[in-house]
């Protein structure tokens, strides 16, 4: 078998564009899913039954369906529901955001709940208002516990962006698979794809480990 | 717009086959990944130094590469390299196992590391051997502490089997795609598939949580 690694260099511009889209999708998803997760978390804590129920259903549903199926579903359902034609990128973004918002909502809830209730009561006994106690006592501590989990979610999210390739978003996986079928350089392209993901993902995974060590709370 | 769910009733046998393969693939992956993951994890913690470095590198690499990439590589590139062609199901099983095993080993490592070192020292002082300490002191507590993470890995595995549709494993996702393409009813078919996945995954998640609540006290020290 003859290998021709030149093909990777030849298509470097396309691959670089794919990498850019992968990163853009990761950043955009997180930028939407952090506020999205906060909204869903607040919904779950609402005193209005219907609202808290809706929040719970959102979290449980989107955490318990495969993302690749959600991507397909968004691809077919969004144009009908919203009556507008979404671009592939926007469709992928919506699917990713639904999934990651659900995870983030759980992360935030667990983070806030991990701070003992006595602290809130003590702060209020000292004359702080509820929002002051939240801002000055609970949230600074909860942030330390939320940050490592959020970092892990970030890495999963980065890897999961490869799934939107099934609806032809031109990110790294889709670009590499396209080049593969155009040039028939299967082994070279697939190995290059894995290597590029590795080069991008490995430092992130190591950074997450570092964040866990630095901020992780041990009992 | 009007919905027509009849394609699902007309093809329920075809979809049920897919569901069965999803379950088979999930169970087989979880069993294989657990065994490989335990070997990886133990090798990383207790193995000789020359083994630790490559194992750590392997685990960290798997955490960095998307499972889709591993699947596609195993199915399309591996046969070119070795001349061994794997049928889709076996390629998916191999790829998912390689991927999930890395996470199992991480969970095992975290579980063992969470036991206070004082316990190991105390066991040493009582004259226990290294293997005895792992078997009688560390493992019984670590297994319980690993449960929540292992449970979420179980649901990740079931969800990841849907990605095997990309290499044409005829599991639920793939069968749904086929039906939706034949009947032009993607919304009904994919919505049903989503509900089916939810109905499998939600009880699994809940059962693991309930089980953990019952045994959590065994892992406390």
Image (tube, rainbow, N blue to C red):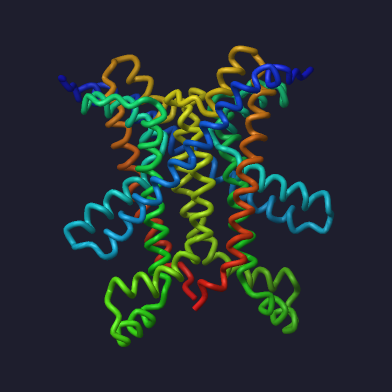
Q: In the picture shown, does residue B77 fall above or below B220?
A: above
- Horizontal and vertical percent position of residue B25: 47, 36
- For this view, does A57 lie left or right of residue B201? right
Q: Residue at x 73, y 20 (%)?
A: B5
Foreground of the two, A39 or B195: B195
Q: In the picture shown, does residue B175 fall above or below A219?
A: above
- For this view, does B138 lie left or right of residue B182? left
The answer to whether residue A188 is visible is: no
Q: In the picture shown, does residue A68 fall above or below A149?
A: above
Tell me where residue B50 sits by quadrant.
Answer: bottom left
Foreground of the two, B92 or A156: B92
Q: Residue at x 27, y 59 (%)?
A: B43
- For this view, does B48 lie left or right of residue B139? left
- Horizontal and vertical percent position of residue B27: 48, 42
Foreground of the two, A163 or B116: B116
- For this view, does A159 lie left or right of residue A94? left
Tell me where residue A83 sits by quadrant.
Answer: top right
- Horizontal and vertical percent position of residue B8: 68, 21
Q: Residue at x 63, y 71 (%)?
A: A138
- Horizontal and vertical percent position of residue A167: 52, 24
Foreground of the two, B80 or B210: B210
Q: Residue at x 55, y 45 (%)?
A: A31
Q: In the picture shown, does residue B31 fall above or below B178?
A: below
- Count all numbered tags in the image, as a single digit: 0
The answer to whether residue A103 is visible is: yes
């Amino acid at each position: 078998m003859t290998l021709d690694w030149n093909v990777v260099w030849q298509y470097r511009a396309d691959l670089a564009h794919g990498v850019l889209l992968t990163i853009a999708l990761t950043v955009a998803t997180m930028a939407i899913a952090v506020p999205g997760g906060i909204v869903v978390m607040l919904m779950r804590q609402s005193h209005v039954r219907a609202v808290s129920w809706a929040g719970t259903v959102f979290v449980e549903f989107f955490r318990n369906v495969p993302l690749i199926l959600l991507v397909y579903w968004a691809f077919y359902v969004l144009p009908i529901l919203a009556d507008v034609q979404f671009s592939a990128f926007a469709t992928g973004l919506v699917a990713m955001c639904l999934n990651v918002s659900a995870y983030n909502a759980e992360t935030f809830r667990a983070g806030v709940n991990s701070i003992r209730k006595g602290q809130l009561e003590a702060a209020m006994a000292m004359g702080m208002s509820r929002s002051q106690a939240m801002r000055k006592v609970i949230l600074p501590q909860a942030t330390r516990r939320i940050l490592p989990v959020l970092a892990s979610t970030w890495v999963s999210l980065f890897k999961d962006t490869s799934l939107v390739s099934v609806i032809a978003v031109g990110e790294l996986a889709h670009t590499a698979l396209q080049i593969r079928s155009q040039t028939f350089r299967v082994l070279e392209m697939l190995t290059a794809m894995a290597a590029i993901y590795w080069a991008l993902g490995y430092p992130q995974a190591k950074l997450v480990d570092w964040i866990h060590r630095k901020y992780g709370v041990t009992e | 717009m009007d919905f027509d769910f009849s394609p699902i009733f007309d093809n329920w046998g075809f979809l049920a086959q897919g569901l069965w393969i999803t379950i088979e693939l999930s169970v087989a992956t979880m069993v294989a990944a657990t065994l490989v993951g335990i070997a990886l994890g133990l090798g990383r913690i207790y193995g000789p130094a020359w083994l630790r470095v490559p194992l750590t590198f392997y685990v960290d690499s798997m955490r960095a590469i998307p499972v889709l990439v591993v699947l596609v590589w195993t199915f399309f590139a591996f046969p070119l390299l070795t001349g061994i062609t794997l049928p889709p199901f076996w390629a998916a099983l191999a790829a998912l196992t390689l991927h999930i095993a890395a996470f199992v080993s991480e969970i095992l490592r975290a579980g063992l590391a969470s036991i206070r070192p004082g316990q190991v020292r105390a066991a040493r002082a009582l004259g226990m051997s290294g293997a005895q300490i792992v078997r009688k002191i560390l493992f019984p507590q670590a297994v319980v502490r690993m449960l929540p993470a292992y449970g979420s890995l179980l649901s990740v595995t079931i969800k990841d089997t849907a990605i095997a549709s990309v290499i044409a494993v005829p599991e639920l996702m793939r069968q749904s795609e086929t039906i939706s393409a034949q009947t032009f009813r993607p919304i009904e078919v994919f919505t049903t598939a989503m509900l089916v996945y939810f109905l499998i995954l939600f009880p699994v998640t809940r059962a693991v949580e309930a089980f953990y609540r019952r045994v959590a006290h065994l892992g406390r020290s």
